[in-house]
Amino acid sequence: VSRTILEREISAQPDVVRRLISRETGHVKAIARQLGGSFDYVMIAARGTSDNAARYAKYLFGARNRIPVALAAPSLWTVFQSPPKMGRALVLAISQSGSSPDVIAVMREARAQGQPTLAIVNAEGSPLEEVTDHTIHLGAGEEQAIAASKTYTASLAALALLSVSLMEDEASGTELALVPTWMATTLKMNEGILEQADTVSQMRHCPVIGRGYEFATAYETSLKLKELVKIAAEPFSSADFMHGPIAIVERGSYVLVVTPPSRFREEFMDLILRLKGIGARLLVVSDDAEMLATADFPMPVSAGVPEWLFPLVSIVPGQLLSLGLALARHLDPDHPEGLTKITATW
Amino acid sequence: VSRTILEREISAQPDVVRRLISRETGHVKAIARQLGGSFDYVMIAARGTSDNAARYAKYLFGARNRIPVALAAPSLWTVFQSPPKMGRALVLAISQSGSSPDVIAVMREARAQGQPTLAIVNAEGSPLEEVTDHTIHLGAGEEQAIAASKTYTASLAALALLSVSLMEDEASGTELALVPTWMATTLKMNEGILEQADTVSQMRHCPVIGRGYEFATAYETSLKLKELVKIAAEPFSSADFMHGPIAIVERGSYVLVVTPPSRFREEFMDLILRLKGIGARLLVVSDDAEMLATADFPMPVSAGVPEWLFPLVSIVPGQLLSLGLALARHLDPDHPEGLTKITATW
């Protein structure tokens, strides 16, 4: 029996992604055909967890589609009332609720400027889709826990589907279809985390390190640790971390490392050995046995996940860890203090 | 007598900015005339402190010039070897040394793609300027302390000069010329910080909160606290912080708030009162007497600085605080452990 709503929503992710792919593939292909060639870059408007999905898009569209991505600062559209001229941009909104007023403001202005617009949204019939040309519905079902889980991975899947459709790459589509299986395997591999989390429950502060595609995972894992367990978890790119912020790590410090599956292997092994040398306590999310063997707290990822889809799977152990820590500390994981579902920022 | 190199470099900032403006204004105007109309958006390649200058550019060019800004993920150009197609972008590098290999790689590719390129750089005759069409030299003199100070504010001044030149706005040029005076006043107002820092020297963790233009100040202040004092200082936008991460604040937590000078006033007063209610210890950088009065540790900014130039001045108290804390903790502020001057990332 699932004890919490959040645990049910984390466990539902393989099904949510499977349904999304089977229902939306044709629709997203049609959108991609209509959009093809109409833009030079993608501007993304998003907040919170959706902003972390946008970080994934930056590497995904950049490395795979060779399309630059700019992350909008929504306050330019709202508080400053001085919207940038978005000439030759595809303007993309990512929003679970479809109700964030500042994300809506960006899309409204994009349309007024005559730019193509696309929304990735979970709620049906939201105000957001009224102001966009195209909408991809996540169809994840209502997310009842305040902290996002299934809508995050579903947003990544929608972005991956869009990327594949823009490339018209059937082989990649076949890889994408394997994500639900990799997610399910990873859930299974980490089912012990909920019990084991109490062994690291003294953690109060924790840098979370990724790179490339896994920068998004570092951000989203950090956000879950903050929201659910009040841990001051700061995300870093390993490239930046090594050249300065590593100074904050001392003997006994907790550090969570998410290792990318292919590139950066040597760099991450160096980083891990350096952190071990300092005497840090390491939590490692990885598909690599050697990396996992260095960890005080290993969090395995299914073998075989390609780099460009790794964030859809590598977030799962961090979600479970955050949930496990919340339970260990007798915090309510479904309704964390001070957290609201819709980010009504102006 | 200045006790450290860093203190001398922090104190030199008014002169550095004054010299930059008087020497480069004509040159930057000429660059702006040549560039005018040749791009739809700006893509910036930068690392570390220069990346924080890029965050300033995002609001500056966005709000004042209505030009969107994308921050490049340099690894796409290097490790992934899959550079995005930068059609209709002005590609801008910001680098103190002009020697970061990944920033150079972005510029080399931009030129190969036929994009207009511009570098903002301190070192003379660096490899970076060999691969760019235009170069703005900061002329800040060699920065001997490992942690950047004067090259950061000089980079902001160069960006402000570029923004003004693209707008052809004489009145704004007059405001920019007042920055050295505001900086000098702010240095004077905060000269006590070096002695008072020991009253907050127990600080180990500290969220640093800004918004809009002051998001850059929050990032750069955090970076100085990490580099110089090993404090786990994480930057936040107040918009994001209020909707989740505020959960990490407890009675006795340190929180540093940088309040923007005009917009967001009400929002920041709400935030400050909420933090006081929790029992946080507040460090406040502000030009507003009422906000400063709420602080356990007030760090005043000169009156009269307009919003778009505020980051050039509001970083000064954070630089002095970081230096003061380093001295209080008997750390070497000129050569912090584990820090290197040139970020040689691939």
Image (cartoon, coloured by chain):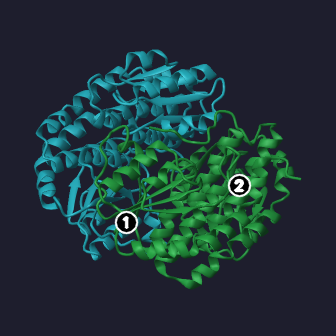
Chain colours: A cyan, B green
Q: Residue furthest right?
A: B1
Q: Which amino acid does label 2 sit on?
A: Gly
The residue pinned by badge 1 equals B41
Residue under the point 78% across and 54% down: B8
Q: Is residue B201 above or below residue B93?
A: above
Q: In this view, does A317 lie to the left or right of B264?
A: left
Q: Nearer the viewer, residue A141 or A199?
A: A199
Q: Which residue is drawn at 62% across and 71% down?
A: B23
Residue B14 is drawn in which quadrant? bottom right
Q: Which of A102 and B72 is in front in this view?
A: B72
Label 2: chain?
B
Q: Quadrant of the C terminus of chain B?
A: top left
Task: Please name the residue shown 22% across and 59% down the image.
Answer: A135
Q: Is mark 1 on a helix, strand or loop?
A: strand
Which amino acid, by three-letter code, is at mark 1? Tyr
Q: In which quarter of the image is residue A293?
A: top left
Question: Distance from label 2 to label 1 (Cα)?
Answer: 31 Å
- The residue under label 2 is B318
